[in-house]
Image (cartoon, rainbow, N blue to C red):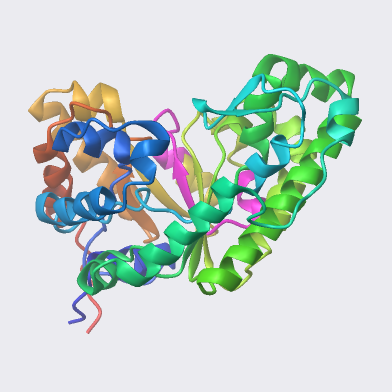
Amino acid sequence: MVQYTPFERFLAAARFEKVDYVPVVGAITHFYMDHLMEYQAKGIEALLDRERNIKILRYGAEVFPEVPLIFIVNPFSNILMDMLLQLDNRDAFYWGQSELRVGKIRSTEDLAKIEIPEAFSSDVSRFLLGEWKWYVDHIPPDLKKDYGYCDGLIRFDSPFDTVTENVGASEWFIKMRTEPSFVHRAMELFTEAAILGAKALARAIGEPKWVILAEDFPGMISAKHYREFVLPYHQRIFATFPQVLKLLHNDSNTTHLLDVLPECGMDIFHLGYEVNLRLAREKMGKKVALMGNIAPMGVLLRGSDEMVRQVCQEQILIGKEGGGFIFSSGGEVNQGTDPARIRLMVEYAKKFGRYNDLIA
């Protein structure tokens, strides 16, 4: 029987290959691990603490030995921030952090001032590139082998979410009706930049084996608007590295988009807990592997032990049918969640998620 590392099991399931049991992946970030390890650093300071991040990955392997934490160290180009720095005003935040002030796009005139720069053209982006190179070279070999950390991963900068947050969600969504040319121009510009940045990053740290695109705001628009203002741009992004595994994270309620989402070119969909897993499987079939779908707050954080068991059993039995299922929370694990509950997810995956036709 094949012996899988946790990351190999994740990759095999994502390809609809037969595995011994349903893999468990942690939708866990610094937000949770900082609290668990009682770290005080926040925001950009936390992101750039090399030794702390290695300790987080090592501690994760000790506390959750069979669970890759795939959202901790994700190399990205940061090119979209460099573009927003071209505007004279500093009336918006990047990543929602006050220490990273950037220009706010208020009009077509502002948009016209923005050009796609060379990748890593700002001090921050050059610094980040140095960090990504360091991680690729210095993450301990066992963590890289067992969990895939910085082993051929590139995360695309997020064009739709970036512009939505910058312009303001209400105004951005209104412009889809009143000024669609503005929306298309912005998406053309920021999508082209995201692709250029990812390609430059690949040249710097190595070609990817898999990629992540995280975009939550598309779940808040209609299927009609998704087809017009998101789908063609996400298709271009995922076509950048056609042979690699492509993961889309969107933990908003995308129930109304289930028919169209597979057309974006993703291989794995990390869906939100509000999406019915059975319905998602019926709609997507074997076109897309599904990753989820236990509610991070209502069940993992606040639910009773019996509720956790029941939901884990239900979701695993639904998801494992036909393969292509990765058990995870339907959204980020919240601070205060008992680590034992993450380990229970693995226990229940082994109990309820075993496949009879093991690979020999």
Q: Which picture quadrant has residue 77?
A: bottom right
Q: Which picture quadrant has residue 313?
A: top left
Residue 118 image point, x, y percent: 73, 57
Q: Residue at x 25, y 53 (%)?
A: 51
Between 259 and 95, the residue placed more toward the observer is 95
Magenta-highlighted residues: 260-279
* 142 lies above or below 275: below
Q: Residue at x 38, y 71 (%)?
A: 17
* 144 lies above or below 93: below
Between 55 and 280, the residue placed more toward the observer is 55
For the C terminus, the image quarter is bottom left
* 168 lies above or below 270: above
For the N terminus, the image quarter is bottom left
Residue 348 image point, x, y percent: 14, 48
Q: Is residue 150 magenta?
A: no
**Residue most extreme to the bottom:** 360
Q: Is residue 261 magenta?
A: yes
Q: How many marks?
A: 0
Q: Residue at x 26, y 35 (%)?
A: 32
* 148 lies above or below 104: below
Residue 224 image point, x, y percent: 76, 32
Is residue 75 shown to the viewer in this render?
yes
Is residue 285 shown to the viewer in this render?
no
Q: Residue at x 56, y 70 (%)?
A: 204
Residue 156 image point, x, y percent: 58, 52
- On screen, residue 101 versus residue 304, left or right, reads right
